[in-house]
Each structure stands twice: as C-alpha cells, then as structure tokens.
Amino acid sequence: MMNDRDSLLRQLHELRSEHRDLDTVIALLVSQTASDQLHLLRLKKRKLLLKDEITRLESRLIPDQTA
C-alpha cells in the first residue's frame, strides 16, 4: 500500500510541476503579440487535462470515510 501511495505522490508531483511549467509558457506566449494561437490553444488544453488528472490523483490519495 505504501509503495502505491508513494507512486501516486511522485506522479502527482510530476503533474503539478508540468502544470506550473505550462502556466509559465502560456503566460509568455500570451504576452507576445505574434504568438501561434493554435499552439497556445493546445497548451491550454494540455494544462486543463493535467489539472483533471491532478484532481483525480488527489482524490485517490484521500481515504474513504464512512459516515
């Protein structure tokens, strides 16, 4: 169980890091007047997919609690 949790935490860390990196790249492209809009759209879509995956992993790390 701990190995699985460690693996999830490591994966979560990698996804968060990539999400932050994309945020930086997107901000840089937005600030440029001649940026490639298709490329920008693809980066934003990737960022949203990463956020969804981060949320999914975080929910797996929270133990189920019965009422």
Image (spheres, helix red, strand yellow):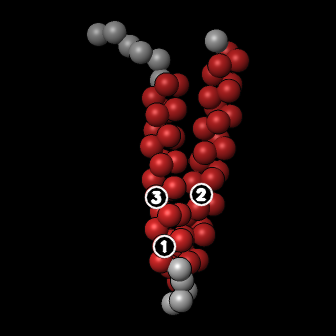
> Which residue extends farthest bottom?
33
Give percent across and percent down for residue 1: 64, 12
Q: CB under 8 Å between callouts 1 and 3?
A: no
The Cα atoms of the two marked residues, 1 and 2, are separated by 20 Å
Q: Amino acid at mark 2?
A: Arg
Q: Is residue 48 above or below residue 25?
A: above
SS for dot 2: helix
> Which residue extends farthest top?
66
Neighbor class of circle 1 (other Cα within 10 Å; few <14, some 14-19, many 20+) is few
Q: Mark 3 or mark 2: name the one nearer the start of the chain.
A: 2
SS for dot 3: helix
Mark 1 or mark 3, whichever is nearer to me? 1
Q: Which mark is residue 45?
A: 3
Q: Amino acid at mark 3?
A: Lys
| Quadrant of residue 21 within the rendered picture | bottom right
The Cα atoms of the two marked residues, 3 and 2, are separated by 14 Å
In the image shown, does 13 or 26 lie closer to the viewer? 26
The Cα atoms of the two marked residues, 1 and 3, are separated by 11 Å
Task: Give the labeled residue for mark 1.
Answer: 38
* Residue at position x 60%, y 69% in the image: 25
Task: Give the labeled residue for mark 2.
Answer: 20
> How many marks on residues?
3
Give percent across and percent down for residue 8: 62, 28
Q: Mark 1 or mark 2: name the one nearer the start of the chain.
A: 2
Mark 1 or mark 2, whichever is nearer to me? 1
